[in-house]
Image (cartoon, rainbow, N blue to C red):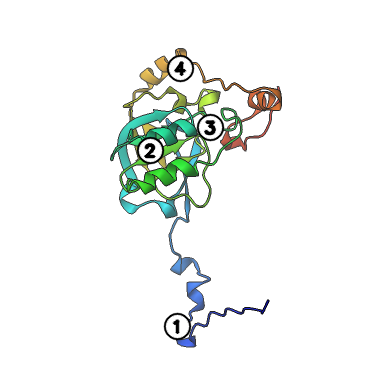
């Protein structure tokens, strides 16, 4: 087979090294590509890829549409259960709840594919990769399986996202959240063997999903 050579030639008058390696004064963004959020939904933090968020979604408020797994979310989104203005909640996908920590690329792709990327947010205790686009907040800690506030959400609860100020909250008084804590029961995955042991010892994403035996 003959060798194939493909060269990209950029004229010298169009090449500017400052478009490749930038200093602080010419940065693409003053805050970088990621933002860490905190609030009553993420006491130990959450992560969003700010660089992939539509500017009009940097601040968002909408009702929760809740799914207890990634598979359930995919089915629900494709079935039209998510509308413009909603906040998709995918829980029980953190290190303990998975068990493991699936990448939530499929549901985010379905949201984008239905042209909802500029009107629907998604929050999860699961994880995202660098390919995620949209107002998708992951790694929420503590996760639902560890009793985190994301596990206390009910359909229709108003989720407030303020990425510029690093905030992620549910619009509920602390008394209501505490009331829900008292009746909370985490979802139990039907797993055995090492996965069962892992689920019992795994920490939430804020602590790296490491195993901690006490």
- Are dots 2 and 1 in contact, CB under 8 Å? no
Mark nearer the N terminus (1 vs 4): 1
Nearest the viewer among 186 and 79 is 79
Q: CA distance from mark 2 to mark 3?
A: 19 Å
Q: Nearer the viewer, residue 94 or 107?
A: 107
Q: CA distance from mark 1 to mark 4?
A: 60 Å
Disc 1: which residue = 14
Crowd band around label 3 with a 10 angstrom C-alpha radius: few (<14), some (14–19), many (20+): many
Query: Compared to 7, does 105 lie above or below?
Result: above
Reading the image, the residue beneath label 3 is 93
**Residue drawn where x is 50% and y is 69% of the image:** 22
Taking the image as shown, residue 92 lies to the left or right of residue 121, namely: right
Foreground: disc 4 or disc 2: 2
Give the mark nearest the N terminus, 4 or 2.
2
| Foreground residue among 139 and 178 | 139
Residue picked out by circle 2? 78
Quote the CA–CA distance across marks 3 and 1: 47 Å
Which structural element holds mark 3?
Answer: loop
Mark 2 or 1: the one toward you: 2
Residue 181, label in figure: 4
- Tag 1's secondary structure? helix
Q: Label for residue 37?
A: none
Instruction: For mark 2, give the secondary structure.
Output: helix
Task: Give the percent coordinates (x, y) of residue 74.
Answer: 43, 36
Q: Secondary structure at mark 4?
A: helix
Q: Quadrant of the C terminus?
A: top right
Point out residue 112 in the picture as x, y percentages from the top left corner. 38, 48
């Amino acid at each position: 087979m003959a060798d194939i050579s493909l060269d990209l030639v950029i004229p010298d008058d169009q090449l500017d090294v400052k478009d490749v390696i930038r200093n602080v004064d010419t940065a693409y963004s003053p805050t970088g590509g990621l933002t860490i959020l905190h609030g009553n939904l993420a006491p130990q933090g959450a992560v969003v890829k700010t660089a992939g968020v539509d500017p009009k979604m940097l601040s968002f408020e909408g009702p929760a549409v809740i799914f207890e797994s990634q598979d359930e979310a995919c089915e629900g989104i494709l079935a039209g259960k998510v509308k413009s203005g909603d906040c998709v909640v995918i829980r029980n996908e953190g290190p303990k709840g998975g068990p493991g920590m699936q990448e939530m690329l499929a549901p985010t792709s379905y949201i984008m594919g239905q042209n909802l990327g500029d009107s629907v947010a998604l929050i999860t205790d699961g994880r995202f990769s660098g390919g995620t686009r949209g107002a998708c907040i992951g790694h929420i800690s503590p996760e639902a399986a560890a009793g985190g506030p994301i596990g206390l959400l009910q359909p229709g609860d108003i989720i407030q996202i303020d990425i510029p100020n690093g905030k992620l909250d549910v619009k509920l008084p602390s008394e209501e959240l505490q009331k829900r804590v008292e009746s909370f029961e985490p979802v139990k995955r039907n797993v055995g063997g090492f996965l069962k042991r892992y689920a019992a010892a795994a920490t939430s994403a804020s602590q790296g999903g490491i195993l901690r035996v006490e």
